[in-house]
Image: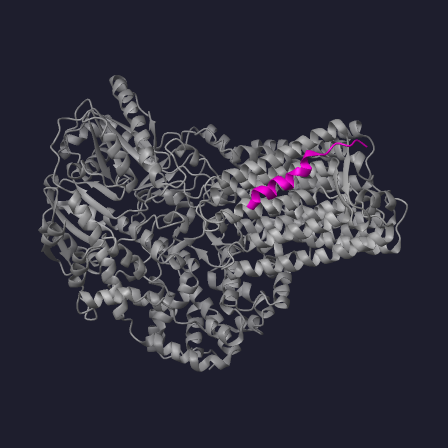
Amino acid sequence: MLLNQPQVAPARYAALIKAAEAAARAIPPAFPLSATVAVNPFLGQTGEDFATAAARLARVAGVPLTRSRQDYAAKIASGEITVEDLSAALAASASALKPKDLAALKARLATPEAAPVALPTVAALAADATGTDWPALVERCFGLWAAGHFDRGQALWSPAPGRSAFSAWRDWAVHDLTPEIAGLKGFCAHVADAPDTPERAILRAADSLGIGEAAAETLFHRLLSDLGGWAQHARWLLWEAELGEATDTTITDLLAIRLIFEEALLAHVPAIAERWQQIVAAHAAPVAATPDQVADAILQDAADRAHQRRLAAQLTGMAGATARPAVQAAFCIDVRSEVYRRALESLSPEIATIGFAGFFGLPLAHRPHGTDEVAKHLPVLLKPAMFTCSHVSPEDEATSRIGARATRAWGRFRQAAVSSFAFVEASGPLYGAKLVKDALGFGEAPKQNPRPRIDGGLTAEAKAATGAAVLKAMSMTEGHARLVLLFGHGAKVTNNPHESAYHCGACGGQTGEVSARILADLLNDPETRAGLPAHGIILPEDTVFVAGLHETTTDTITLYRDMELGGHVADLVRAEAWLSEATRITRAERAKRLPRAHAETIAQRALDWAELRPEWGLAGCAAFIAAPRAVTATTDLGGRAFLHSYDWEADEGFATLELILTAPVVVASWISLQYYGSSVAPDMFGGGNKLIHNVVGGFGVVQGNGGVLRTGLPWQAVHDGESLAHEPLRLTVMIDAPQEAITAILDKHAGVRQLFDNGWLHLLRLENGKVAGRYRPGLAWEGATPLRSAA
Amino acid sequence: MSTFIPFVQFAPLVLLGAAAFALVRPGRRPGAYPAFAEAAALAALGLALASLIQLLVLGQRVTAVGAGPALLALRLDAVSATMTVLVGFVGWIVVRYARSYLDGEEQEGRFHGLMLATLAAVLLLVQSGSLVVLAASFVAVGAGLRRLLMFYGERAEARRAATKFALVWFGGDVLLVLAAALLWVGFGTADLGAIGAAAKGGLPLSAHIAVALLVVVAALKTASFPLHGWITEVMEAPTPVSALLHAGIINAGGFLMIRLAELVQASSGGMAALVMLGGLTALFGAVVMLTQSAAKTALAWSTVSQMGFMLLQCGLGLWPLALLHIVAHSLYKAHAFLAAGGAVEAVASIRRPGPVAVPGGLAVARSFALAIVLYLAVASLFGLVSGHKSAQALALGAILVFGVAYLVAQGLADAAPRELTRRTALASLGAAVAYFGFHLISGAIWGPYLPAVPTAGPLEWALIILALLSFGLVAVAQALFPLWAHHPAAAGLRVHLANGLYLNAVLDRLIGGFRAAKAH
């Protein structure tokens, strides 16, 4: 035979490749920091229940999925979690391994949990055997390569573009002498001899490492977890590719690369072979929760129930309906809006507020002023369908781009070899003034972006149809005020690589400005207005829409006067007075939670280039309520609830409810679970320590010198130094809608249903503003009696 | 010489006093201590500025106690006043930054104390007037910085970085003490001013050896090739530490050379070593920097390179320019580190205006020609003011030309619109004018107090030509970069450079840096 055939049985080949694919899908995607959004770090585990996922992640990453028992015990001791909560959680657990009674559960609580330890890799075994820190070496070598490979423009000398990760790494690794210097003799030759496709490399490594089909999935998952954020970045590439109906193999490339290291290390330290085979055997065992993991899941459930009990006690029914308000203000459902909405409504009974996903249902892809780069302004689950830009006249557009290019040329002058010396001597002294300016926090005067518009415009029919769809989804079919304000939101922070994490998640990590302005324009458009009655919506003649941006760091509001206001000037002037008063009230409330803050210093914090906690973002988020505002209007929800306006009686065929359960609820679950993961498992799902962050490639951060890419929320975003600022709870979704309607939608959408069935979210039903039922796995419901009596 | 006491001499005491409070409040959220720390740093800056006025009004001053080898002396002169104001300024900025940045850290109070104490040691160092003060303050700076690098001592990487730093820094201190002893033997005085004056009359053998040791000390302290590895790893400490290190502490080696300029210049071998080591480090660091994708790591390599360039300037006898470089680089690098969180936005803004126009070979040739014309025009304009230029200064100007040519080339790319060409041309003119302007100013301020450029002999000429050729070669390669950087033949080169030619890995191997961290 002239050509080598792979010496692999087809069944084994298929099983191993399938395991590699499953391992890849077990990794959550991490979006680049330039436009990052919260991702559920357990995205790959939502198909299994919470305790089983805990067992899996303990095996592959060595992280817990719950808090320490000490934390739960403290909450029980303080009365925050009651015996009723514990009993209810214990009763609700369907596991055969659960403690037999409350006393047994309490006995578990009193024994400190054993910290989970991941099954070791070959590198870890080799380190134990030889004393050389092989995992650190792999992290260092891989990290240096990956930083360059995924670089989006930080280094002037990047690798040749267009290569697959696997072949690019091979080219790198046959030259990189570091492993050999560290003592891994012959590594370059080992790489040179490795198969030239990732699939074959995986197969060969599986053979030389003795990996059976049964062991492959969690073993591969273990290795990908070892690569931390790099694997998650690669998983994001796959996510993006699949959104565009393509595919991407980078993550399998990374697995193949990591396996090549394992192969080399096992050959280098043959003494560990026997121990390694025991590890492989451990991987082959099915993933199953231990009694401890089941008990911990019950304790977390009790904590969730304690929160639900307090929340249910706050929801006491509907506030009375009011006459036509003078101003309606629509905000993003983001929990930060709750504080501001409450403050605004407190100023006058003539003000009504509405909660809706901050992209206002418009699936935008936007090109800002001065660039042709397209930014997606919509939840990352969706594909853009509407193309917009903020470009100005061609001359002005050209001028601003040339300005940016000249700045860029100067930046390259600063960065390049040889010219960097001239740069320092010619302009270094001027940085003295910059240091003073930045140290004292003199921000630049804010510039308003040009008015965005839809590329090519829309037909009159499309305008009316889009406008009507959005208004219906917002439950705004009648009773419109004279002035309707549409607020997107965004953060104002300085010198913070995680800036986009504070922006609007529903707008893909951008601010909500473009979405709000496009919608206001659309709804003010006479063509839209003319067509709305045909869709069953009667907008009063005198209703005007004005867009604005809620800056969540400082709680200031910017209004965009994109249209002629005519007779509405007085309305807007009055609204502005209310808004600035609401800003004052909100800042005072916000300042209480932030370390070193006073209402007066909030604005300055946003400009402080050394401020690591400019705001708390969505920390604390714990509930999602889809109901008329009247249900929550009189309640202080403490900035912890997503509030989605929803009136089921106006929802024909429950289309809006379906939308809410499948889009905003899922986005909110991603956010809440990201905060959860970053709080309980910061080593794996947290962004690390901001004090030593080192931005890499313009898309992520590493800690200190390099190594693993860190994704998720930095420790400072969930912790105030003394205690967690985010109490890790699974999100409680509360829906004011008929039980059958909710059940029918869950039945239709398996992906959403499993979030509730497997304990990643809770679902409670509201009726007349009170909790009326609890969803149970398997499309079942139980009455709310336990909740009420406990309350 | 007048008999006043320079205020800045009290600055280290003020800082140490403030640092001592950390012993009482070492922990989290230590009340008003962070504000108090900033006030102390601001006071130190105020004292440095007050002494600058004293210097201008009352003249230079050496304050001394003790005698013989144990002489303790502090100097106030053009060099020390510049350095105290610079260090005081950067110190204030950094301590102010840490006020917000360290909020909520478990060892917040201790951090401020260590920063203030280290700052005090640096302020003492730059005022050194005698050998003992010089050596002792070097050791004190190292002790402070080592503790700061260990701020996250639970991280194995931090411990490795601190170990490596300590090895190089304190190794340098041992050599410094040896050099000091030799200088005492050679000149019979421990007064740095007296040593400088005596050196003008030629060097005894012990002093020749001392200069050789001092050059090695400077190389170690400035993270020169090949022992630069410690500085590219110290991002393990909070950002303000990096800023203080790269904008303050790293200058100590250059300061050492400038402080002892008369002595060093009296050894042509020492000067030649500085040119070669400095030039090599400058190019090496700059080229490695091109390959670094982590923002702070790239900045660290840039420091290696800039400090090399500064040593090159020392070696050429362009002392005022070396001091200018220290000042300019410190201000730039302090800002770059403290603002490193903006790297995500910086990269996004690079991408926004679309692809970069790539200059071809012809455009590069034209840009070099244009840059030379620009250089000649601006240089002769400034020449009318400042008079004759030495060969060394002209060579340095030529290196500027190479740099500016790169800027010009970007505007000359075929795809570049006219308006962009105009703007880069203006920026190039601005850079050339600023460059010569600052040179003129530095010569006027520090020139009278530092040795004049030596007349170039055959050795000097050889070194100048070597420097010009190597810098010119790298500059041309850089300008033509997009044409070859992605060629497969260059891929291996990129790997080796991204690894810093493995020098750090070899060092790790030698000192056990690859060993598994001990449990603790």
Quadrant of the image occupied by residue B320? top right
Percent position of residue B399, x then y: 72, 43
Labels in figure, total: 0
Q: Is residue A17 visible?
A: no
Give the camera-side residue of A374 and A715: A715
- With respect to residue A267, does A675 lie above or below? above
Instruction: Specify whether A522 is left or right of A511.
Output: left
What is the basis of the colouring in this image? one colour
Q: Residue at x 22, y 37 (%)?
A: A470
In this rendered view, identify the residue nearer to me: A402 or A103. A103
Using the rendered view, name the quadrant where residue A238 is placed: bottom left
Q: Position of residue A41 (x, y in %)?
A: 33, 57
Counting from the top left corner in percent of width and height, residue B391 is at: 82, 41
Q: Is residue A780 above or below residue A432?
A: below
Tell me which segment is drawn in magenta. Answer: B1-20
Q: Main secondary structure of the magenta part?
A: helix
- Taking the image as shown, residue A699 lies to the left or right of residue B455, namely left
Would you say A784 lies left or right of B407 here? Answer: left
Using residue B307 as the reference point, say whether residue B389 is left or right of it. Answer: right
The correct choice, above or below, for A513 with respect to B23 in the image is above
Which residue of the protein is positioned furthest toward the right in this rendering? Answer: B201
Q: Residue at x 46, y 82 (%)?
A: A1
Q: Is residue B18 magenta?
A: yes
* Magenta highlight on residue A596: no
State the residue at coordinates (28%, 34%): A340
Question: Can I make out residue A497 in this image?
Answer: yes
Q: Position of residue A10 (x, y in %)?
A: 35, 77
